[in-house]
Amino acid sequence: MAACNAPRASSRGGSPASKQRQRGVAPKQRGGLWWGVPLDCDVAIVGSGPYALSIAAQLGELGVEHRIFGPPMKFWRDMPAGINLKSFAFATSVYVPSRGHTFPEWCRANGLEDFEPCTMASFAAYGMQMQDRFVPHLEPVEVTKVSGRTDGRFELSLASEERLSARRVVFATGLSHLATVPDVLQRLPKGLVTHTFFVSDYSAFKGKEVAVIGGGASAVEAGALVHEAGGRAEVLVRDAYAIFHDKLDPNRSLYYRLRYPHSIVGPGFKNRMMQEAPFLLHFFPESYRVRLVKSYLGPASPWWIKDRVLGKVPITLRTNIVSAEPTGSRVRLVLRTSGAPERVLEVDHVIAGTGYDADVDRLAYLDPDLRRRIRRVERAPALSRNFESSAPGLYFVGPIAAMSFGPIFRFVGGAQYVAPALSRHLAGPMRTATGVARRLGLQI
């Protein structure tokens, strides 16, 4: 088996970085190659967010050779200022194999809110600290292509022009590449329409008129941020209502805690059942699971954005875009609102808060031949109970796995189940037993 010499994250004294140095793995580059790290490895992890970091930390503890690629916590670090997590702090962590390192514990240690709302910036800072401590061997370079080889391994091409091979590849790229824009907007020049995924700074919209499309959190938050940046936004919602969640009291009475138990996706028995048996839905009929994923926990905005929008940003319901075309440096939208005549809206820019499509064909880094080998559930990969696709050795986790496992895996909280389960599978029974014995302090 090829070696990657990935460091273990351990709680038995000494930092992972010092253990890496002690084993002679030099964390530096020369001529585009990593000294001390062979170009072949057992497991390659594509991605560097909470799922990827959690898996890398667990694999390190089990002694599984691996490499992990990508700018750490990039999605979270690129979030615009003024935006908070949609999830509770206890449901949003990097799940490392030692105790005392959850996001709420980090928040308390730093004098920050430890329930909700927690800022995106604080979660990004926490994730960076977890990466530095438990996954110091992360290589902050993008993977540009993954293709199959005739010997059954996979070849990865990096933005640094390095190439390596891996026996198995785990894709943990979150929402990257999955942003979707309605067909009616796709013919607009790129300078006139932007998906919320790609907007990090709203100051460019100062003094601008902006149409925001969508009724979920991303669209409503975009409307608020355009307004706060000094622009004029109108949020156009296709549905008959825009939902805002209520604030959840962390000190609810025993009665309400029993009737509506906490879970990582909100209170309620069904939510709690999915948390307690996270892999159960995988064994349900595919048609039922797909319907559930599509309909469960639909578009809704958090309570903390409500006062920043209502009365300040117009939200027009039951509205569809009939056509969109450029007119000079602006956009001309023809809108149809239920019960009203068509109207024309001219704006400087269109922001699409129109969600994401878990479509394998959107993953541009996957070689077309590999994509064709992957069986689908709808457009997402059909996965085994070990998160393996029909292309042996290729694994998918995070939002793109939801069609195979249920809605809980659309959220960061799903990583607490995926990371240990997938890592044990990749390690095999002997390494898993060795890792467990090590955690218990047993001699092996």
Image (cartoon, rainbow, N blue to C red):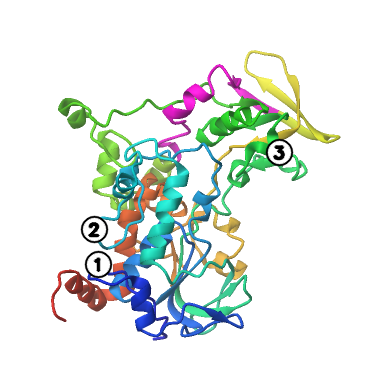
Position of the C terminus by quadrant? bottom left
Judge whether residue 46 is colored magenta. Answer: no
Amino acid residing under circle 3:
Leu
Q: Nearer the N terminus, badge 3 or badge 2?
A: 2
Compared to residue 295, the image places residue 46 above or below, namely below
Which residue is tagged 3?
185
The local crowd at label 2, few if under 14, some if 14 to 19, many if 20 or more residues have their Cα within 10 Å, is few
Q: Position of residue 53 (x, y in %)?
A: 40, 62
Which residue is tagged 1?
11
Which residue is tagged 2?
99
Question: Residue at the location (45% across, 38% down)?
Answer: 84
Q: Nearer the N terminus, badge 1 or badge 3?
A: 1
Q: Nearer the N terminus, badge 2 or badge 1?
A: 1
Question: Residue at the location (46% across, 25% down)?
Answer: 243
Q: Position of residue 432 (x, y in %)?
A: 24, 73
Is residue 66 at all visible to an observer of this figure?
Answer: yes
- Read off the magenta span: 294-321
Amino acid residing under circle 2:
Arg
SS type, badge 2: loop
Amino acid residing under circle 1:
Ser
Is residue 397 at all visible to an observer of this figure?
Answer: no
Q: Are marks 2 and 1 in contact (CB under 8 Å)?
A: yes
Q: CA distance from mark 3 to mark 2?
A: 48 Å
